[in-house]
Each structure stands twice: as structure tokens, then as C-alpha cells.
Amino acid sequence: MTSSFDFAPLFPAGLPAPSARWTGLAKYSFVGGNNDSEQVPLDELIEAANLALQREGRSLATYGLAHGPQGYLPLREFLVSKLKRDAGVNCTVDDLLIVSGSLQALDLVNNTLLARGDTVIFEQDSYQGSLNRLARLGVNVAGIPLDADGMRMDVLATTLADLKSRGIRPKYIYTIPTVQNPTGSIMPESRRAELVRLAAEYGVPIFEDDCYADLVWSGQRPPAIYAMSPNGGVIHIGSFSKSIAPALRVGFVVAPWDVMSRMLSLKTDAGSGALEQMVLAAYCKPHFASHVPALTKVLRTKLDTLMEALNEQFGTAAEFEEPKGGIFLWVKLPDQVDTLKLYQAALAAGVSINPGPEWSTNKGHSSSRLRLCFASPSHQQIREGVAVLAEVCRREFGVPARSANVEKRA
């Protein structure tokens, strides 16, 4: 039923733009952080759900399962051992907070540390969800360019010195160091050490977003920046969205108690979904370590299909660095391509993409770039979708002028 009451005069200033109605995924969907549906460990999750409910189902009658506001204790215990094994993080269950996906973690950290007019430091190309939040909060963002090893420390050092000379102390340095979104790079340990040194020198905390860190092709990752910081000046967040399933909406924060206690006072949802936490705890302890390598193996084959399709359809017109893990490929098209306009034309043809300017602090730098998620579509959908995208690029922007058997320039 359509309401005749006019709510518009009642909306406060500063609300985000209204959302469009959901009309379904595009035929060829390369957007979002969706994963491969065939790799959701369905049988094991069903088994874990039954086990968890039989064992502790009646505790659902109590908020937080009587485990307190930081989340279900067995899941936090699993995370303590996982973070130690995989990322070198030494923490206890008291240092962990379970949240409703890493997006809630972003909100809690921002609401704890930021006020309108503050300044933060970001990687120049970064997660759209993080950037959108800062725009709504009225926070200034200083973007640092990336290279094949992630955020450039020389530019970071210059930026920190410049801000200090103007009396500005950034509230944090936000980085996605392990499988960067959208570029897919991994920051080496030596650069992480330099980042920790610079942050300590200028008295700025590091906000480490590690939510793609499980999906590294080699299976080996550098230690988390949290693990390398001697003074505790790091807030670390992660997620089960990319390793198990995004719709579960379970993430976590690792932080010192002086920050954690403030975030807890802002987390007013009476606890994140308890059933999801119970099921994950029952599933992860026996299965997580074997599930992730199987998942990354499948994702790696899809990346290969996407890169082959781009080379076949676009030739040298599509440039990209092979990511070291994850579910995204960051692609540079010729300068005349405006990917915000390409997004509209491609969507009309049944292909959804993420235009680069939405994932960058520098709209000019990213105007001809786009992010493609290769995890969700099938191999056939990847090949067909890239072919349709290439046809749209030919029609709308005059590219690609195919150049078969020509070496892609670096």
C-alpha cells in the first residue's frame, strides 16, 4: 500500500540518498563481496547447527547466550587460536568483540574515534564501504598511493609530516594490508614494520582491516600489523564473510580495553546474532583449517578464467596486476573510458561492475578503473559477461581496439 502521508519534511538534514528498490542481481554480476555458492560448506554447517542447538539451544532465551556483550565464548576462543596460528596475534578472549560483520566494526571504530572535521589517512584505492562512511561523518581523508606492495611509506611519511606542520593529528591510518581491496596486493613484513614505526613516531593509531586475509593463494601471509606493534596502537578487524559466507554477518574486533570498553558502550544492539555465532563455533573448530585452502583453490581458477577472458576480449586495452589472493580484480581501461558511465551502459546490457571512483580517494586517478568480483559468477558467466562488457566498451567508448598477440604493457 502506498502511503499518502508526506514524510519528506520530517527527514533530518544529512541523510544518505534514498535507496532504489531491489530488482535482483544482474545476469552477469561482478559486484559486491559475494562468494562462490558451491563452496559454502552446507552439509557441515547443517551438522554444526544441529549440534549447537541440541547442546545449547535453550541458552537462546538469554541475551548474549549469557556469555556477555563481547560475544559467544567458544567462537572467541576459536579466534584466539586462529589469530595466533595464522597472523601471529597474541590476544585473549577479553580482547575480542564479535560484531555483525566488519561493517559494524567500521561503524564502532569510527563512532568511538571520529568527530566531524577530523582527518584520517587511507590507501588511495580502498573499500567503498569505509569511504562512504567517512563522507557521511564529515571527516577529511588523506589518500596515500599504492604500489605492488601496498601503501607507499615514502608518501605516508611526507603526509604525516605535512599534517603535523599544520597542527593536524590524524585519528587513524586505515589499511587493508593482506589482500588489499581493491588492488589485491599484500604488504610485506618490512613495510609493515615501517608503518608501525611511522605511526608510533607521530602518535597515530593504525586501523587494520584484515577481512580478506584468509584468501591468500600461497596460504602464507605476513604477521598482522597488530602482532608487530609494541605499544598496542592498532585496532584489528576481521570477518567470516569471505571465508565462510557473507550472509552470516559475523565479524570481530581485536582492540585494547580502553578502546574496546568505549565500543561496547556504543554497541546498542543487545548482541550480534547468537545462532550464527553458535553455528560458526561448532563448524570452525573441526573444519575451518581444511575449508579455506579448498575455497582458495576454486577462487584461483576463477581468477585465471577472468584474466584469460579480459586478455581475449580486450587485448592490451585492459591492464591489471595479478592479485595475490581474494575475490577482486582491479582493472585499468583506456583513459577515455568513464567507468561511472560504463557502469550504467553495462548494467543495461546485463553486466554489473563496480566503477573505480567509488573505491578511491582520487576520483581522477580511478575514473577509468573498475573492480570485478570473480568469486560469485560461474566460469561460463565470467567468459560471457566479459564478452558483453567488451562489446559495451566498443560501442560506448571505442575500445577495445583488439590487439591480439600483443604483449600487455606493464
Image: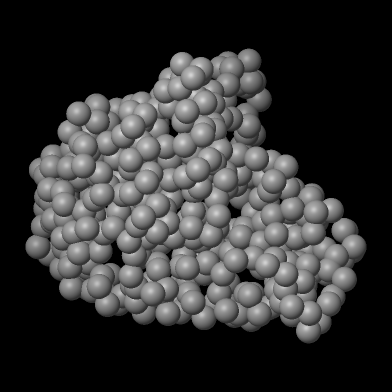
Position in image of residue 243 (x %, y %) = 36, 65
Q: Quadrant of residue 47?
A: bottom left
Compared across the picture, whether 287 is left or right of 111 comes to: left
Residue located 64% across and 54% down the image: 354
Position in image of residue 125 (x %, y %) = 57, 47
Residue located 53% across and 60% down the image: 148
Compared across the picture, whether 191 is left or right of 381 comes to: left
Compared across the picture, whether 201 is left or right of 359 comes to: left
Image height of 362 relative to 375, above or below:
above
Residue located 48% across and 74% down the image: 299
> In front here: 87 or 284?
87
Residue located 56% across and 38% down the image: 143
- Quarter in which the C terminus is drawn: bottom right
Q: Is residue 281 visible?
A: no
Q: Can residue 222 be seen in this view?
A: yes
Position in image of residue 227 (x %, y %) = 24, 50
> In front here: 293 or 167?
167
